[in-house]
Image: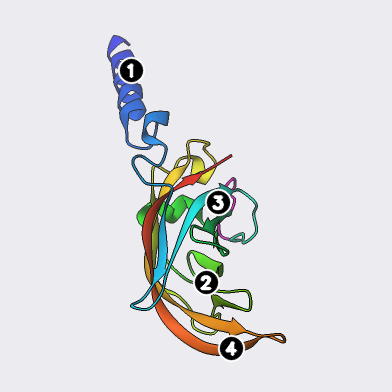
Amino acid sequence: MQRLLFLSSTSLLLLASAPGCGDDDCGPGSAPSKGLTAANADVQFVYEGLVSGTNNDCPDPQAPEGVISLTISGTRVDGGGIVTLCVPRPDKLPDGLPLGMSGVRVIDLTADVNTDCKYTLNSGRPPTGTASASGLCDAGANTSGFALTIDGALSLDLVCGNPPSVMNTIAVQFTGTVAVTVP
């Protein structure tokens, strides 16, 4: 019986020290609060203050019980604009997910350029690339937050006027590693 107690104690010690099991493994680490960027040779839009919520805005019916989709949103550093992402399976985000409908959905990305014009996400051209997280615990519900890394591309429309009309469509790299807070 003593041997069984020893094995149980050893097993518990290993579980407690496994990556992702303790609060010390949770959180954004050294990821900055700003730096998610949509850019090409002509434009650069930087987003900050990303906040995540278990809003269940894009649930995956295949998700295990207790996994609730995340909505992540932030604002543009240099003026008006927002970024909004939805993650149906945050439990899979540490391993990496594709950008797009089968993974991390880019719901909105805007950048005001003047009082009459702004760039908006071109939903007719799906984003490409990947998104992943480090320090993500409890499927994104842990208040320690996490670091989000995006390495992809998407298209933006320059929309101007009233009524609004598309003036131009551009391709941008959508990249960066940023801290995400969880209230």
Q: Name the mark nearer the viewer: 2 or 4.
A: 4
Dot 2 amino acid type = Met
Q: Nearer the viewer, mark 2 or mark 3?
A: 2
Please state the horizontal and vertical placement of residue 134, each as a whole percent of the image: 37, 47
Mark 1 residue type: Ser
Q: Are marks 1 and 2 in contact (CB under 8 Å)?
A: no
The question of residue 68 being in magenta is answered with yes
Magenta-colored span? 62-69
- Give the label, 1 or 2, closer to the camera: 2
Among numbered discs 2 and 4, the one appearing first in the sequence? 2
| Residue 150 part of the magenta segment | no
Taking 134 as reference, is 159 left or right? right
Question: How far apart in space, not on screen, are marks 1 and 2 (Cα)?
Answer: 44 Å
The front one of 173 and 102 is 173
Q: To which residue does mark 4 refer?
A: 166
Relative to 140, say whether 93 is above or below. below
Q: Residue at x 32, y 36 (%)?
A: 19
Q: Are marks 4 and 3 in contact (CB under 8 Å)?
A: no
Residue located beneath label 1 in the image: 9
Q: CA distance from mark 2 to mark 3?
A: 19 Å
Mark toward the start of the polypeptide (1 vs 3):
1
Within 10 Å of disc 1 (Cα), the crowding (few <14, some 14-19, many 20+) is few
Position above or below: 144 against 71 = above
Q: Amino acid at mark 3?
A: Pro
